Amino acid sequence: MGKGIFLVLEGIDGTGKSTQAKLLHEAVLQKGHPVMLTREPGGTPLGESIRDILLTSDLSMNTWAEILLYSAARGQLVGEVIRPSLQKGNIVICDRYILSSLAYQGYGRGGDPELILEINQRVTEGLWPHMIFILDLEVEKSRQRLEVGNPKASKDRLERMDIDFYRKVRQGYLDFARRYPSITRVIPSDQPLEKVHKQILGYLEDLL
């Protein structure tokens, strides 16, 4: 994996994951560490084009088309951005990674999680984060946050899914955390923003 440190933030929509990723990036930068922030799907020209297809287009898409598009964007991001940055000794913070596919397309859409995992292991050549922060929030509260901060007309394809879908996705995240406790940290996100941020930094003390 190289000399760098790979960190990922995960969670259902509305947990504040992207905000915490930015705060973490700023904090690590202030400590003087070489750090970069990227996101999924996206982070490369190809990935951003795939992101537009996945989230903002009105194209009809079945579950496996969705799975493979996410995987293609992820493989490009790892090869073009994440792995080279890690090899230089940088800290890489990614807003979503493989666990999103397992939770959303596996648990949420009903795809085979083991096959999704196998595909992603191949496209990333087995690259896993040193630590995954799962921001956890009751689905009803996450929906309320989205309604306040994101008008219905501007929601993407996944944000428009119903509450049962998100209950399945949340369960996928929690199941993964129980299965792989050594690399996951579940943080309740129904706390003040700064408190969540401090908990994330606390978990990183040994790594940084």
Image: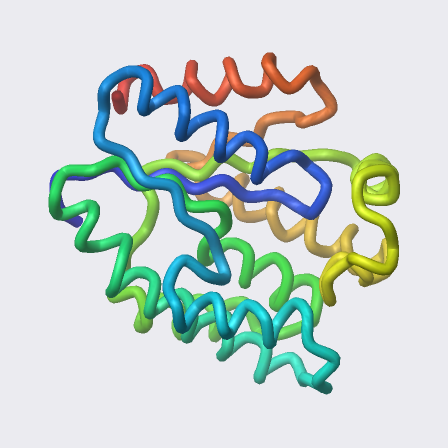
Q: Position of residue 96 (x, y in %)?
A: 50, 50
Q: Position of residue 40 (x, y in %)?
A: 48, 57
Which residue corresponds to the image point at 65% horizontal and 79% vertical from the top-left?
A: 63
Which residue corresponds to the image point at 32% horizontal and 51% vertical from the top-left?
A: 128
Q: Position of residue 164 (x, y in %)?
A: 85, 57
Work out whether 49 lies above or below 168.
below
Which residue corresponds to the image point at 28% horizontal and 18% vertical from the top-left?
A: 206
Q: Position of residue 83 (x, y in %)?
A: 22, 54
Q: Quadrant for residue 74, please give it.
A: bottom left
Work out whether 29 lies above or below 89.
above
Q: Quadrant for residue 35, please give it.
A: top left
Q: Is residue 5 left or right of residue 9?
A: left
Image quadrant in which the C terminus is located: top left
Work out whether 99 lies above or below 133.
below
Work out whether 36 lies above or below 56.
above
In the image shown, does 207 or 26 lie closer to the viewer? 26
Number of marks present in the image shown:
0
In the image shown, does 128 or 179 lie closer to the viewer? 128
Which residue corresponds to the image point at 74% horizontal and 56% vertical from the top-left?
A: 168
Q: Is residue 59 left or right of residue 205?
A: right
Visual colour scheme: rainbow
In the image shown, does 187 or 4 lie closer to the viewer? 4
Q: Is residue 95 left or right of residue 153?
A: left
